[in-house]
Image (tube, rainbow, N blue to C red):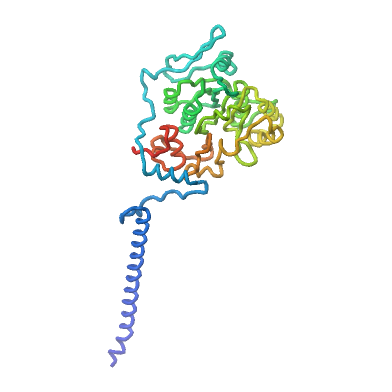
Amino acid sequence: MTCRLRCRPFCYCLFRILSTFFSLVGLAVCVFTLSVLQVRELSRVAGQDSRFDLSATPRPALNRHVCSPCLMERTNTTRNRRHCGNVLVKPSVSNNKRFEIKCENNESLSVLGDMPEDTSSFMLTFKDPCLKQYVTQHCYDQKKVPRIVHYVWFTKHAMDVYSFLSVLSASKFLNPCVIMFHADFLPFGPYWKNLMMNVKNIVFVRRQAPERIFGRRLGYIQHKSDIARIEALTEYGGIYLDCDQLVLKSFDDLRDYHFVMGHENAKNLGNSVMVSVPNAQFLSVWHGSYKTYNPRQWGIHSTFVPFRLAQDNPSLIHIENDTLINPDLGRIEDVYSGHFNWTNNYAIHLYTRWVKKSYTLSQFRTMDTAIGQIVRLILYGSPVLCSD
């Protein structure tokens, strides 16, 4: 009797422990079974078999800018890969030449001279009469704006992958007669060397960065660049591009206007890409507005002032709402990590000053994002994923 009474608490505890154990085992079996059924259903919907890979890295979620054509392109680029090959040009005797401009007896022409060991491009100074003569005689077609591309490159630093892609895209889609680098020092590094072998009409337009405007000292190096790009377009006309502005198609439609800028957002106009005839009246008005320049203010005269001037002088400017700079900085992650619909854009601004993402050309070959598609279009003529 005493033994039974002592055994009851122990037996009861053992019973509770075993019951709890088997309950947990049963719950685990149920969860596992449901998981397997869910995986099989996902596999069936995805058109795959039971080896659905749960360890695969998920794709970035589709954002609000994705439309049916973009989604179709994403599907196609994922399933139909292509052999891309190597876009970089290896040094050889045949491509070891550089573009040069010659003027004599009121005639100008371009020739290919020997490339120097430092792979520097042919140099002329800003406002050189020979350069102006070459532009006048060779860079105009039936459009108002000449086929010239301008970059401003102050201070000495290596060319990065985005600048390389920008110049390559401008050469591919804009078909310029000359690409002018307005600079105190030329770029250097492997991307610059390869660019000199890929693009044969680059000219070093040597000049110092502007230091003052209407007696006011220019603050940031970016403000000095703002003045230099206005002066370059005033002198020669053409298309100005920031070094992180990628061209996606021809600007021929835009070259029918006297001056073109695009909205960066609803309240300003971005100066990372501009299209202009020489001595455009809007440029003169804009340049004159720098009499009120404040070096402590960041983007007032470069973006907000031209927006105000456009409202006051609508006949002097054509504005593209969302085809030159779209998306703005607030949504640029849609380009780097998502599938932004860029197919209607003339160009796209990458904001590399603010977005610190470094890639190699090889990484873009299999990158299933908007930036991957854009870079493959520039390098290989198609946004389709590379198979190698």
Q: Position of residue 122 (x, y in %)?
A: 49, 17
Residue occupying the point 37% across, 18% down: 94
Q: Is residue 334 above or below residue 86?
A: below
Residue occupying the point 51% across, 11% down: 102
Q: Is residue 37 above or below residue 240?
A: below
* Quadrant assignment, res 93: top left
Q: Quadrant where the C terminus lies?
A: top left
Residue that extends furthest to the bottom in the rendered view of this protein: 1
Q: Position of residue 194 (x, y in %)?
A: 42, 25
Residue 8 vs residue 31, the one in the foreground: 31
* Quadrant assignment, res 7: bottom left
Q: Position of residue 370 (x, y in %)?
A: 46, 41
Residue 284 vs residue 106, the one in the foreground: 106
Residue 98 in sight here: yes
Residue occupying the point 37% across, 22% down: 91
Q: Quadrant where the N terminus lies?
A: bottom left
Residue 183 in sight here: no
Q: Position of residue 208 (x, y in %)?
A: 58, 22
